[in-house]
Structures are given as structure tokens and as C-alpha cells.
Amino acid sequence: MKSAAVAALGIVGAVAIAGVGYGAYQAITPATSGYAQVVNVDPIVKTWQEPREVCQQVTVERKKPVKDQHRVTGSVVGAVVGGVIGHQFGGGSGKDAATAGGAIAGGVAGNQIQKGMQEKNTYTTTEQRCNTVMEDKSRTEGYDVTYVFNDQEDTIRMDKKPGERLRIEEGEVVTQ
């Protein structure tokens, strides 16, 4: 019976030595599967500009259309009034000269008065004015992820933002 106990003890010892040997092998051989610690995530951002039309209502003042473009009415009325006033002065042929001079001065004055009235004859309206502005746009297209596995640091580009760790199988990051 002693020999069976010794044999059993020998087997247990051999298994223990093999277990220690396997543990030592595991300690010096890096794992190919497990979880890597994520240490940095940098978003990859694409930026560009797009044109956009901006419109607004603005108040504008416009001149009303002129019916008497050459200001004939002002000239004629001014000449008549000036002639009547000029006729009040002088005597004989002087009266005719004063009437003619008054008519000429009145015609010029009437023309200028009508011009001023036409320039002030305005109306206010609202118009839509548009212009193009450049608008900044951006989109995150992926992430550069730095991770540590088996004391080795590496970087991988991913479509989605990862969590705090990455699954590693057979030395490769599982991205699914």
C-alpha cells in the first residue's frame, strides 16, 4: 500500500510541477485574447463650408413716377405769375421789358420749384433682399483609438466611439 501512496504522491507532484510550469509559461507568453484598456480617443472631424441664402424684408423709399418730366407746368405757371408781377413795374416800353423779365424769371423759378416738389414726391415700400453667406459644417467620420494590451500601446481607427476597453481575440481588436 505504501507503494500506491508513493505512486499517487508522485503523480500529484508531477501534476503540480506541470501546473507551475504552465503558469510560468503563461506568465512569460503574452496573451492573444482578452481586453485592452482604451487610453485615448481622438475624433476624426471633417469640416467644410456650404453656401446658404439669407433673405430679409427691408424698407426702401422710392420716387413716384414723374408725369411732367420736362416740368412744363411749373415753367408756364411761373412765367404767368412772373409776367403779372413784372407788369406791375415800369411804364411804357419799360413796362413791356419788366413784364418779359418777370415772365422769364418766373418761368425759371417755376421750373425749379416743380423740380424740388418732384424730388420730394416719394413713397415707402418693403422689398425682400437676399444674399449668400458661407456656413461652417462638420461631421465626425471616425475615431483614432489608442489602447494598451500586454503592456503594448497601439492605435486603431474605428467608425464608432469605443467604451473604456476593447475586446482582443487572437491579437486583433474586435470591432463588431
Image (spheres, helix red, strand yellow):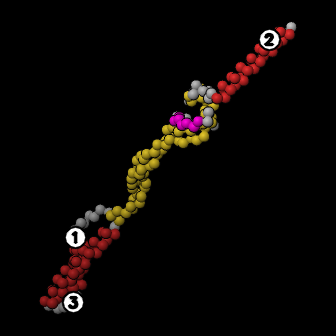
Q: Are marks 1 and 2 in contact (CB under 8 Å)?
A: no
Residue 156 is a magenta residue: yes
Numbered disc 1: secondary structure: helix
The question of residue 143 being in magenta is answered with no
**Residue at left 62%, top 29%?**
30
Label 3, secondary structure: give it: loop
Whether residue 141 can be seen here: yes
Considering every residue shown, the one lying at the far left of the view is 93
What residue is shown with label 1?
72
What segment is highlighted magenta in the picture? 152-158
Name the amino acid type tagged 2: Ala
Q: Is residue 80 visible?
A: no
**Res 173 label:** none
Amino acid at dot 3: Phe
Instruction: Give the label on residue 89, or none.
Output: 3
What residue is shown at x 17% (from left), y 91% (from top)? 91
Q: Residue at x 86, y 8 (%)?
A: 1
